[in-house]
């Protein structure tokens, strides 16, 4: 008997041609993201090129009860793109047209497969940029919407959530809808845009995005400064936020991560001690003033060794080191894999969360450098997984402890990586059974057959 | 036969006592907002004091199929609080406790009946403020959440949507859930917080709000400047936004509104011509720099007569004049009522929208001064309704023309007042039939019996 998925593949070939494929190498490429979840092969991969194709393919999958897993660049850290129940991996990477950029409105409409690197290259001549920066240049903006991504700039420019004003979404039954619009705000109707942002492909496929852009700042400067203790660094952050200094980036690296970055990125003049990396945007005068204010506050908490980088090459070097933190961490222990953890707490609990995290790391006997978007209360570790039979289990155990502590401090189990597979077990604890039941009822209302990215976000 | 609502009143009296009432004066007070919709009496008014009471009352209404209309301060401009199908007016004004303020986290948790005036008075000593400012001091923050309110500060500080991180919501079937949390961002689960924000009481009753606060700026200055044409004023706004000047407020008044404000608020040194009111926040140096930059840009578009107000009394006078714009407009034509219109367009379409609006006003033969939150593309008119039999019909006809033009320019039929009764007819045109169908399916999933604020947002 032919499988339901075969009926989908055959019918979809009528309009996708060779763009729906069972090629083994392509299925393999679509079997996992950049995580440590076990890979699972999709039955087929479909490279769609238009919103209408996405909708037609979904209608077929709905008709035949076949799972659909949206796939952007495959950079998920939580298993979002793994087709745990097989079905179709719906690849959006060819939907990479920049449909419209309006300089007067400082906004754009793009297809979901556009990457942030591609968009920023396109915008540069117009004096505009897209600020949300998860550290991976390759990720698609559709994927960023689906996982409610953010990154180092969120403290000033907001996350993807604050920058997107509208979407085109293909629904599981084949309807194609537009949510939101182009205006900066609106008070009309339910906020479907924000319902789909962060829905991780479980409600539909985001195919187009309308979003705000920002002017490239006239001036920028960056600095690294170093502290005797992690607590001093965190208290500096709180004081800077309270003073309302509009810092563009404010990143924390613990002494382990700092040591790794010094070695990996050949940073000079910095020691392996708790450090903050800053970036300020504005006019030359306001950048100078912000920098001076931040420096004074930091010095009040014993900071030393301010290294200022105002020219672009120096700034790039500093931030490249920050963006390479994951690779620097991996280089500490050759042969180890890395699990990127993600937790967030209210800012006032950040020292407690991070100091507790360091105790958990010490008790585990594992290495796990810490790096954080501290302006948001968000921090990560890279748990280095020993190449031993129980290595992964020990690493996951440590990850669970870090998350449990963040939740106990009133935090969330993910600031920006999403739930996917890895964080499902925490969702009820974080939100409560009744709130989770409401989420499930929305899922049922929009995807009654449960074809959209099954096995993600919800347990069962 | 007793009516279903009588069963609710009797059962609710068991835990609300005299706080559920059929008193005629109270029912009358709860029969309308600050709009021109025909008043309708609720069958009873319930003054709840806790989230649990709200949930218990909703469970009873659900059981007996009785409509529930949440009521805050009754300042809605679109008929949100009018109980068009009778039932219970659920008054939250006694839920006015400020539950927690955290200075290090710059956030607070409040009950939904807290007003913005009350909250800001409470916060002043801590150097914090709540920025969202719809112009009415009396409005409750719960009502602001329900209608997705904003106001003059949104260009810098965002609307209520960008400032709320979590809610407590009583659902129609009596469940009480918490959405979101305290962290500045989170990537876990569907964004229920933003689904309830702007849902206008049609999905449940917001009873508690967790939200961000901001530091009171060290320095502030305000200015008014005047232009020969509306187009010059609007182009100044676009240029200022593109330069990334972090202006806190930027308001447009047309020559009619400006004339009304000069007369009503006794403003000196200003002429009845198109004008912009600015406010800048920051350090003394950055405020001075922002002001200088804005002035240079405005002068490039022919602005003259900059009036700077840096001390608080002068600033207050200027903004009091702006906040009194509605009363100033009414004073132009004694004996006329006012309809506050609300529309929003992409910024680049603002001059087209406003100049077109002025043509519509001229063609109507009515008076309607224009005032706008131009940094957002949002503008209002106060249509002065002549005390004649066809006055209201002529005014509504003009309102429809203004909205239709905004929609044709890619805008939205409400920037901040909401849909309520008055804007229902535009929702399908703005969002499309299929998107509206998705909204309805969410409504059905959460409120299957349709007891929550029936007759609002959706036609039928």
Image (tube, coloured by chain):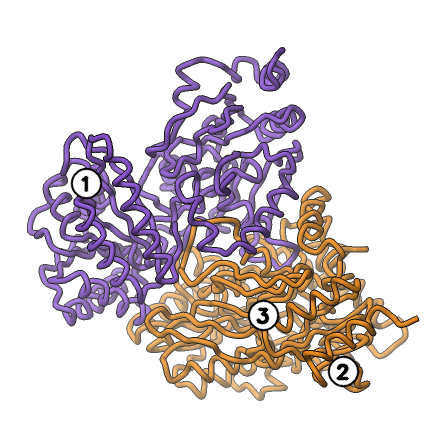
Chain colours: A purple, B orange
Residue drawn at x 42%, y 49% as measured from the top left: A426
| Residue situated in front as seen by the camera: A222 or A336 | A336
**Gap in angstroms between the C-alphas marked 2 and 3:** 20 Å
Q: From the image, which quarter does the N terminus of chain A lie in?
A: top right
Q: Position of residue B448 (x, y in %)?
A: 73, 53
Front-most of residues A377 and A276: A377
> Residue B400's quadrant in the figure?
bottom right
Callout 1: SS: helix
- The image quadrant of residue B32 is bottom right
Label 3: chain?
Answer: B
Regarding mark 2 in the picture, which secondary structure is present there? strand
Q: Which residue is under mark 1?
A: A329
Q: Is residue B247 above or below residue A365?
A: below
Q: Using the rendered image of the protein, determine whether residue B314 is visible from the camera's viewpoint.
A: yes
Q: Check if mark 2 and mark 1 are on a common chain.
A: no
Marks 2 and 1: CB-CB under 8 Å?
A: no
Q: Position of residue B261 (x, y in %)?
A: 61, 81
Q: Which chain carries label 2?
A: B
Task: Chain letter for mark 1, please.
Answer: A
Describe residue B54's horizontal placement relative to residue A138 as left or right. right
Q: Report the side of B283 relative to A233 (left or right).
A: right
Q: Which residue is drawn at 52% across and 34% down?
A: A453
Q: How crowded is mark 2: few (under 14 residues within 10 Å), some or many (20 or more)?
A: some
Residue A366 in the image: x percent, y percent?
18, 43
Residue that mark 3 sits on: B207
Q: In this picture, is B24 found above or below B437?
A: below
Q: What residue is disc 2 on?
A: B21
């Amino acid at each position: 008997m032919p499988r339901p998925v075969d009926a989908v593949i055959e019918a979809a070939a009528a309009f996708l041609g060779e763009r729906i494929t069972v090629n083994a190498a392509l299925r393999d490429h679509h079997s996992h993201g950049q995580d440590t979840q076990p890979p699972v092969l999709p039955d087929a991969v479909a490279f769609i090129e238009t919103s209408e194709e996405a909708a037609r393919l979904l209608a077929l999958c709905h008709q035949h009860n076949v799972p659909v897993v949206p796939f952007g660049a495959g950079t998920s850290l939580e298993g979002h793109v793994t087709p745990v129940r097989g079905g179709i991996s719906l690849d959006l990477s060819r939907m990479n047209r920049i449909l419209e950029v309006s300089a007067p409105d400082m906004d754009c409409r793009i297809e979901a497969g556009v990457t942030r690197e591609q968009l920023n290259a396109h915008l540069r001549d117009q004096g505009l940029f897209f600020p949300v920066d998860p550290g991976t240049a390759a990720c698609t903006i559709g994927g960023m919407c689906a996982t409610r991504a953010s990154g180092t700039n969120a403290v000033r420019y907001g996350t993807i959530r604050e920058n997107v004003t509208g979407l085109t979404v293909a629904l599981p039954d084949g309807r194609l809808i537009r949510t939101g619009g182009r205006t900066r705000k609106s008070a009309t109707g339910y906020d479907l845009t924000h319902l789909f942002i962060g829905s991780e492909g479980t409600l539909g496929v985001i195919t187009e995005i309308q979003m705000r852009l920002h002017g490239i700042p006239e001036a920028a400067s960056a600095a690294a400064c170093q502290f005797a203790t992690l607590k001093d660094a965190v208290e500096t952050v709180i004081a800077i936020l309270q003073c309302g200094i509009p810092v563009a980036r404010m990143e924390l690296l613990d002494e382990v991560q700092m040591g790794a970055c010094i070695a990996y990125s050949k940073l000079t003049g910095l020691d392996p001690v708790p450090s903050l990396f800053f970036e300020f945007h504005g006019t030359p005068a306001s950048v100078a003033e912000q920098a001076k204010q931040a420096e004074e506050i930091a010095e009040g908490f014993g900071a030393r060794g301010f290294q200022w980088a105002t020219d672009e090459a120096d700034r790039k070097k500093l931030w490249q080191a920050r963006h390479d933190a994951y690779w620097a961490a991996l280089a500490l222990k050759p042969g180890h894999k890395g699990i990127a953890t993600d937790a967030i707490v209210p800012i006032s609990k950040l020292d407690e969360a991070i100091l507790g995290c360091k105790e958990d790391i010490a008790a585990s006997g594992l290495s796990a450098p810490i790096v954080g978007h501290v302006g948001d209360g968000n921090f990560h570790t890279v748990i280095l997984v020993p190449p031993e039979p129980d290595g992964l289990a020990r690493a996951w155990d440590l990850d669970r402890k870090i998350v449990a502590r963040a939740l106990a401090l009133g935090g969330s189990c993910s600031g920006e990586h999403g739930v996917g597979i890895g964080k499902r077990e925490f969702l009820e604890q974080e939100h409560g059974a009744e709130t989770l039941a409401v989420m499930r009822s929305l899922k049922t209302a929009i995807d009654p057959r449960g074809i959209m990215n099954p096995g993600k976000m919800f347990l069962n």
